[in-house]
Amino acid sequence: MADLHLVVDRAAGGLAGQIARELREAVRSGRLVPGARLPATRDLARDLGLSRGVVVEAYEQLVAEGLLESRTGAGTRVAARVGAGVAAGVMAGAGRQATPERQGERREDGRPHYDHRPTSPDLGLFPRQAWLAAVRHVLATLPNDGLDYGDPGGVPALRRELAAYLGRVRAADASPDDLVIMTGVAQGISLVVEALVRDRGRRVVLAVEDPTSTRMLPLLRRAGAEIVPVPVDHEGIVVAALPDDADAVMVTPAHQYPTGVVLSPARRAALVEWAADTGALVLEDDYDAEFRFDRDPVGCLQGLAPDRVVLAGSVSKALAPGLRLGWIAAPPHVARAVRLARGESDLGSPVVDQYVFAHLIEGGTYDRHLRRVRREYRRRRDALVGALAEHLPGMTVRGISAGLHLYAEVNAEGGGDPSGLAEAARAAGLTTEVVTSAHGSPGLVIGFARLPAHRVAEAVRVLAKNAGGGVRE
């Protein structure tokens, strides 16, 4: 067992952070080698004269960073994948697991590059060991018939677990029969639109928030939607601006993309009333619902009007988008139509991952994973917001109470050039995206999920220098 030789300054506070920092440096320097076993949290806490919770928090932080591995019955060890690249200091950030691909992830000029979409999660936080254990369990216990073609709506075990989970966590009102397993939110909403088109015998009018993500719009148009943008203000979508002839409206009430606005109680009630009066469907993209930091839980719209709302969710943020695993909870007639469409198009989703996910929910592993990554994302969010306030005090940021990104308002007349700021941010190693709107000024989305907290200040200082003081309120 490793002799840790930790130095902790009790008078300085932040004890869990101090322990994590000491252990991190010990791994990087090679003093703690891959596979080295660490003391049990209770033993280390006793040695240091601290509460066990402080040590647990420090260990969890380093597990989240991929530096440590923790298994029930086997204790906590230095991750086997942490090797010489870490000791040499070439890992692209403590928040990223040191796979060979990550070790080489640098720009040509030597600066770290945190790429991909600003809404992407940190894939280094994917619970590999828990997923692998669940795969082993499923393959060891699944009957042979479980590997056959199944219900195109999804395996019953997952639909049962999801129905209970969504009721408990999102205040949803859905039975297993109301759920259809999808490859993601985009497929789910697209198939609902196709069902509406078949039912009406024409293209359907689909109202969408403005601004919104443009990535799904081509899919929806291909499914048969005529897109009508509707403005978003500080309370969410402006219900009074919804077109009278809309067949459906797509909203992100838990954390609007990109502004981060949470749909207010008054707007929620108004939206449900509008749907009941017009007969339209509400397509609820439960975007970023898992990650809230500074506000109380907000239930889903579907729980208020299960006969008029289709709830769509996925594990793309909570686990990994590459799993292509999502769901819809819909009124019975919509669920039947979508299940039929899946049977006619691709016969449903792969079954092994469905059983694995069901097992993770049932055993509480999924809940524990979410609690762990939620704490880590909050640290990164706090670091980014603090650095922006210090180095770019003229930048107004919004939507920070939840999610994996923040929204920076940019006033072109005041000297802020959205494209120029985005380029400056990317040059600093930040992941950004310019957002335009037909109803307001352009803005800038800045992601923080893939930006390790200890790299934030440097990145924002570079951004401030590159921006040349052109950001103003």
Image: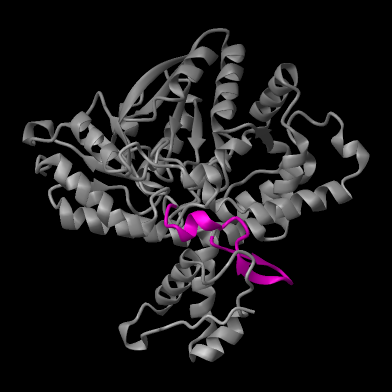
Residue sitting at 37 percent across and 19 percent down?
Answer: 228
Q: Is residue 386 left or right of residue 278?
A: left
- Percent x, y of residue 464: 17, 47
Which is more toward the observer, 463 or 361?
463
User: What is the quadrant of the C terminus in the image?
Assistant: top left
User: What is the quadrant of the N terminus in the image?
Assistant: bottom right
- Percent x, y of residue 17: 41, 73
Residue extending farthest left: 414
The image's colouring method is: one colour
- Percent x, y of residue 110: 33, 43
Residue 441 visible in the current orientation: no
- Write down the region rendered in magenta: 67-90
Q: Is residue 83 left or right of residue 359?
A: left
Which is more toward the observer, 166 or 436?
436
Q: Which corner quadrant of the image does residue 346 belong to? A: top right
Using the image, determine if residue 115 lies above or below residue 229. below
Residue sitting at 56 percent across and 36 percent down?
Answer: 312
Residue sitting at 41 percent across and 83 percent down?
Answer: 7
Residue sitting at 31 percent across and 59 percent down?
Answer: 383
In reply to whether residue 74 is colored magenta, the answer given is yes
Which is more toward the observer, 65 or 307?
65
